[in-house]
Image (tube, grey):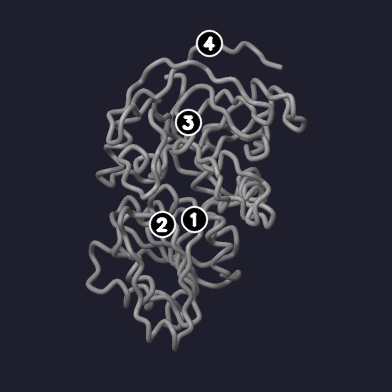
Amino acid sequence: MAQDIPDKQWAMIIEKTGGPINYKQIPVAKPGPDEVLVNIKYSGVCHTDLHALNGDWPLPTKLPLVGGHEGAGVVVARGELVQDLQIGDHAGVKWLNGSCLQCDFCQQADEPLCPKALLSGYTVDGTFQQYAIGKATHVARIPKEVPLDAVAPVLCAGITVYKGLKESGARPGETVAITGAGGGLGSLACQFAKAMGLRIIAVDAGEEKEKMTKELGAEVFCDFAKTQDLVKDVQAATEDGMGPHAVLLVAVSEKPFQQAAEYVRPRGTVVALGMPAGAFLKAPVFQTVVQMKTIKGSYVGNRKDTAEALDFFKRGLIKAPFKTIGMSKLQEVYDMMQEGKIAGRYVVDTSK
C-alpha cells in the first residue's frame, strides 16, 4: 500500500566525517516487510546530530549519512507484515529505529540496550529528509490532534529526559537540579519535572535562559557563569541546605558532571543524560560511599516511555519551546549550537 510517493526527495547529506552537509536530492527508500515509510514533515535538531556530523563519539557512523532522529510525519507506505499502522496515521521516527526484540535486553523492555539496535541518523539514515524508514514496532504513534512541528522535539529530547526523571527515583515534592536547563533537553526536563510534582533548580547561564526556565517551572536559577561556588549555591537553594534529591545532567561540557556528585544530597541520585565528547564522570569516593550517593546513566526511553511522554504532551502539560527553520539551513543551527546560542529547540521544516 502506498500513496503519491515520489522517486526523489530532498535531504541533508553528510558525505564525510566533519562535513560539510549538503542539501541535495536522493532516492526515496522502499519499506521492508516490517517497516513503514514516513513522510517527514518536521524534524527536531539534537546535539547528537552534531556529534554524528563531527564523528567525535566512540561509535562509527554510517557514511554517507542522513542525520536526524526527531522526525514527525505521516505514514505513506508500509510493509506487508505491518498491521497496526495504517496509511495516513501520524508517526514519529526516533533515535531507536529498530531492535532485534529477541535478546535479553529487548525481552526486559530495555530495547535501547539491544546490541543490534538501529540508530536513526547515526547507523541508519534519519529524518533530515522528506521520507524516512522506520521499523513499525518502534516508530512512535502520534495522535492526529497533536501538531507535528511542536511534537518533534519530544521524540528524542522529551522521551530522554522523561526516562531520566523516572530513573532518578525522585518523588513528588522532592527537588531535582537540572544542569543545562536552558537547552533543548533541559527546557523539556523542567516541564516534565513540574508535571511530575518535582521542585526544580535550574542550572545554566544567561538572562534569556533564566527567564525561560522560570517560566517553565523552575523555582531557582543558578547561573554557573556568575557564581563563585556553584556547589554551595545549589545546596543553599534547597530547603534544608543539604542539596537536591536528584540531579539531571543534560549539559554539553564535562565540568557539571563533576560538580553534581558534590552537591547532590546524601542518598541522592545523579543521572547522566548528556554525553560531552571525551568527558569522564568523577566523584569523591569517600563522600559517595558514606553518603550513599548513586551515580548512573540513563539512555533513551523504551516504547512504553515513549507512549507515556507523548501522553504528557497530548494533555498539554509539555510545550517544547522551539523555532522553525528550513531544512536547507540546518548548518546555521549547528553553528548556533556550537556557540551555545540556542535556547530551547530548533525544528526543521523538510519542505524548505
Q: Distance between the residues labelled 4 and 2?
A: 39 Å
> Label 4 is placed on what type of residue?
Asp
Which residue is denoted by mark 4 in the rendering?
Answer: 7
Q: For the residues marked 3 and 4, what is the alpha-carbon distance in whole angstroms?
A: 17 Å
Instruction: Give the quarter of the figure containing the N terminus.
Output: top right
Residue 323 percent across, percent down from the top left: 41, 35
* Badge 4 or badge 2: first in the primary sequence: 4
Between the C-alphas of marks 2 and 3, the distance is 25 Å
User: Residue 267's spot in the image, x, y percent?
Assistant: 50, 81
Q: Which amino acid does label 1 sit on?
A: Ala
The answer to which of 212 and 203 lies nearer the viewer is: 203
Q: Mark 2 = which residue? A: 250
- The answer to whether marks 1 and 2 mark residues whose Cβ atoms lie closer than 8 Å is yes
**Mark 4, mark 2: which one is toward the viewer?**
4
In the structure shown, which secondary structural element does the residue marked by tag 3 occupy?
Answer: loop
Of the two numbered discs 3 and 1 on the same chain, state the one appearing first in sequence. Answer: 3
Q: Residues within 10 Å of mark 1 (few under 14, many from 20)?
A: many
**Which residue is rendered at x = 48% and y = 57% of the image?**
190
Secondary element type, mark 1: helix
Q: What residue is shown with label 3?
A: 125
The answer to which of marks 2 and 3 sits earlier in the sequence is 3
| Residue situated in front as seen by the camera: 165 or 38 | 38
Q: What element carries label 2?
A: loop
